[in-house]
Image (tube, rainbow, N blue to C red):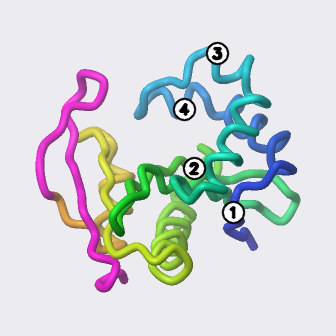
Amino acid sequence: MAVLERLRSDHAPALLVFERENRGYFAASVPDRGDAYFSGFEERHRALLDEQETGAIHFHVLVGEDGEILGRFNLVDVADGGAELGYRVAERATGRGVATAGVREVCRRAREEYGLSRLTAVTTLDNEGSRTVLGRVGFGAVGSVTIDGRAGISYELDLGLTA
């Protein structure tokens, strides 16, 4: 069984494997992180952990039974009771409810552990999987956006109404 864990320093090796193995898959639906992300991974990981300590972000990884990272579920731009949700799931873990379960759990933590009352999220129109997950969890579409030149949708969730 996979477990959602708050990002820690010891997740770095498995997280880097996750990002490398899924880079092409992710780039089909979200902007590519670029080569600099991978070459400076260790420094960036430490910086994110430092920022997480301030409460401005809350990063999570979904860890499988063998210690492998199956997904990332992040809350960024935490301010005034809200945050933006972003997530990505390994290609081999799609279609099994992993994303829905991870998003539900991070929403629960946002409300119960981080004291947040609302979340936002965005996805491209062609990312049907993400749109489905957000709808299942209770996010409502609130407007159109452009993400790296691609048409997208902005979503919001009142954390008092999570499914």
Residue 32: in magenta span: no
The circle on residue 25 is 4
> How would you classify the magenta stretch by its main secondary structure?
strand
Q: In which quarter of the image is residue 93?
A: bottom right
Marks 2 and 3, the one that precedes in the sequence: 3
Report the residue that reaches farthest toward the left: 143
Q: Which of 98 and 79 is in front in this view?
A: 79
* Label 1 SS: strand
- Residue 43 drawn at (x, y percent): 76, 29
Q: Is mark 4 on a helix, strand or loop?
A: helix
Alpha-carbon span between mark 3 and mark 1: 24 Å
Along the horizontal axis of the image, is 55 left or right of 85?
right
- Look at discs 3 and 4 and give the one toward the viewer: 3
Secondary structure beneath disc 3?
helix
Q: Which mark is residue 36?
A: 3
In whole angstroms, how far apart are the C-alphas of marks 2 and 1? 16 Å
Rounded to the nearest angstrom, the CA distance separating label 2 from label 4 is 10 Å
Q: Name the residue under label 1.
A: 6
Circle on res. 90 = none
Region of the chain picked out in magenta, as a range: 142-163
Q: In this rendering, would 102 be left or right of 78?
A: right
- Residue at 22% from the left image edge and 50% from the top image edge: 154
List the residue tagged with mark 2: 89
Q: Which residue is drawn at 67% across and 35% down?
A: 19
Chain-order first, disc 1 or disc 4: 1
Which residue is farthest front?
54
Which amino acid type is shown beneath numbered disc 4?
Tyr
Q: What residue type is labelled 3?
A: Ala
Measuring from the top left, give residue 135's x and y in whole percent.
28, 66
Counting residues from the N terminus, which is met first, the one under dot 3 or under dot 4? Answer: 4
The reply, left or right, for residue 35 in relation to residue 9 is left
